[in-house]
Image (cartoon, coloured by chain):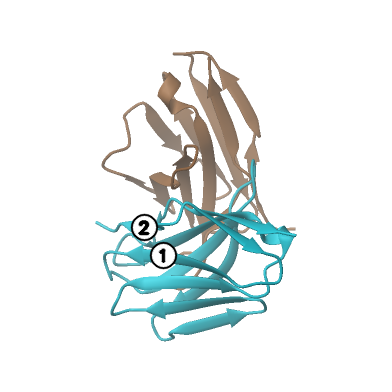
Amino acid sequence: DAMVIQNPRYQVTQFGKPVTLSCSQTLNHNVMYWYQQKSSQAPKLLFHYYDKDFNNEADTPDNFQSRRPNTSFCFLDIRSPGLGDAAMYLCATRARDTRNEKLFFGSGTQLSVL
Amino acid sequence: DQQVKQNSPSLSVQEGRISILNCDYTNSMFDYFLWYKKYPAEGPTFLISISSIKDKNEDGRFTVFLNKSAKHLSLHIVPSQPGDSAVYFCAAPGDNYGQNFVFGPGTRLSVLP
């Protein structure tokens, strides 16, 4: 089945140790998003790719970077994780050409920072 | 900037009764709205959407109502089932092109047997 796949489901890292989360999709969607969700809060958009065009939200910390080497894959790099970066990270995709179209989410990666 | 509010953090409903979840938004950038359902440790799954050309959209037990003048959405679940117990998120466009979506903080629905 076409889907959005995030690996790993659970990631534990140490304070300050770089970590990379990955997302792949078989939907061939042009737009890919990274959201951060902390407990009992709204998912917060970090950035998104419109094809290869990178769009950073104004309040996304510099500590967060992203790469999209091709249509299918997108990575979230956290250069120096702090305790406050512990959260669920959600990848989502969307077809660009249809204005009324939903986002498809992966299962998320739960990041713990020790 | 778009803000999305879901003022009820939690809601408990008896099985078989109606569940009504509310959502308010601040900016009518682009009138297309989404509802998602989320179970613990899983990603959100799409439930139902509505665009500005309608004031109601129905899919089985789920109906979403849109009041554009009040900038208000509501999701009705009838009849509620224990499997509906989850967190429900409302999402509204965060830009004029309908490409970004801003999510509300969610309402945790508990359907009691």
Question: Residue A35: x, y in percent?
Answer: 46, 44
What type is the residue that disc 1 sits on? Answer: Cys
Residue ID at (33%, 64%): B25
Relative height, residue B58 to residue A79 (above, below): below
B98 left or right of B21 in image: left
Which residue is more in the foreground, A76 or B32?
B32
* Numbered mark located on residue B39 in the image: none
Q: Which chain is mark 2 on?
A: B
A94 left or right of A109 in image: left
Count of residue discs: 2
Residue ID at (52%, 64%): B35
Q: Mark 2 points at which residue?
A: B5
Which tint is chain A? brown
Badge 2 crowding class, 10 Å Cα cut-off, few under 14, some 14 to 19, many 20 or more, is some
Is residue B25 among what the camera can see? Answer: yes
The quarter of the rendered structure image containing the C terminus of chain B is bottom right
A61 left or right of A106 in image: left
Is residue A81 among what the camera can see? Answer: no
Residue A109 placement: quadrant: top right
Q: Mark 1 points at which residue?
A: B23
Real-space Cα separation, disc 2 to disc 1, in angstroms:
6 Å
Question: Which chain is in cyan here?
Answer: B
Q: Sequence-wise, which precedes: disc 2 or disc 1?
A: 2
Question: Residue A36: x, y in percent?
Answer: 46, 40
Pointers 2 and 1 in contact (C-beta within 8 Å): yes
